[in-house]
Image (spheres, grey):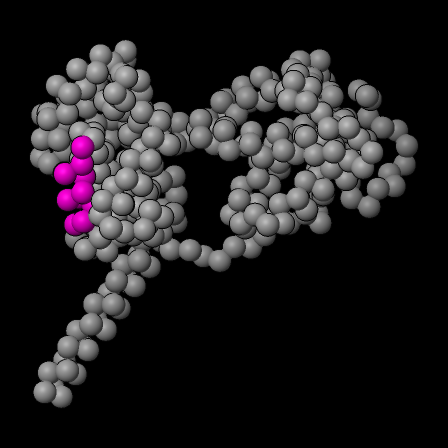
Amino acid sequence: MRTEPYKANRKAVQQRLYTEGPVLPPRLVQRGHLPWLSTYTTQLKTEGKSVNTQKSYMIGLRHLIETPLPGEDIISEFERDSMNIEQLLERVEPFNGRLDLWVQSMVDRSPSTVKARLAAANHLMNWLGQKWPEHLIRPKSGKKLPRTLTSRELSLVKEAAACSEDPVANLIVTMILDTGLRVSELCELNISDIDLEDNSAMVIDGKGGKDRLVLFTQSTVESILAWLPLRESRNPSGDNLLVTKTGNVFQSRTVQRLMDKLADLAGIPRGRLTPHVLRHNFATGLLERGADLVSIQRLLGHASIATTRVYLEISDQTLREIYKRAQTVQIEECDS
């Protein structure tokens, strides 16, 4: 492992960020002996990456590090996670072919998954002071509109939640539709963050490490008040609003399993109902009732208004459907 800049004439077709060889940047030279996993995780936290983003990054990066070159033995999980920063650089440096093999192994993955994993690898390479190979380009993915439930489907889901044997179902559906909370934010919401008199709650350390205020109606107030005695009977260990039957904190996957059960009760496909779909319904509902994009952006906690602007296209699509139905009725009346 070299720790000084390479002195020979440059011969590589693509220039690395610092030199031709895998050399750590000056900020990491004195830390090269440290374990990469804890050091890199600290870096992600310092940058304000959310817990979910950190998990997403690690899934892809661990696959990259494990990818063997021809003739190499497969490394163990312990070997992968116990490397120091210098060893990691030697392992993943972008011109030894490992990065290419890893990208090729994702040929059957969706464009969005590949883009997310390439973003993680790109971040790691920048951290290690390496230049991203120009021939590795993120795949283009078609623009997808956020999925929403129809009015009928939404009514069926609300009815299913109200009649569910699980007492927390109605609270979860009501709160997401009323506040637009992300599922992770809802699971992490504490009772102390809720102001029932003000009909509001504070999301602490949401996506991007940001705090924001969310508002709700009397429906949520009533749902919370009905839930609190049941919550206390579960002997919760912390202050989280949502707890399981054993008093533990709800996880995102637990909420999705609940959504699957509600979808079955409502008679709609499971894939149609997710916490994020309910969040989309919250946003489109605001837009259709005349809310401006900036207000919706703040309520949703979007970093960029460009993310919020996609809901305009859903609203436009809805307008076209309404117009088409109205025109069909008019034609039928004229024919009769």
Residue 102 picture quarter? top right
Query: Is residue 163 in the magenta section?
Result: yes
The quadrant of the rendering that contains the C terminus is bottom left
**Position in image of residue 158 (x %, y %):** 17, 44
Query: Is residue 299 in the magenta section?
Result: no
Magenta region = 155-165
**Position in image of residue 162 (x %, y %):** 14, 38
Q: Nearer the viewer, residue 104 or 117?
A: 104
Q: Residue at 24% across / 50% down in the picture?
A: 267
Q: Nearer the viewer, residue 97 or 33?
A: 97
Q: Nearer the viewer, residue 63 or 57?
A: 63
Q: Residue at 23% across / 22% down in the picture?
A: 241
- 327 up-or-down from 318: above or below: below
Left or right, 9 with respect to 45, comes to: right
Q: Residue at 31% across / 25% down in the picture?
A: 250
Q: Would you say the magenta stretch is mainly helix, strand or loop?
A: helix
Q: Nearer the viewer, residue 327 or 152?
A: 152
Q: Residue at 67% across / 30% down in the picture?
A: 65
Residue 186 picture quarter? top left
**Position in image of residue 134 (x %, y %):** 70, 47
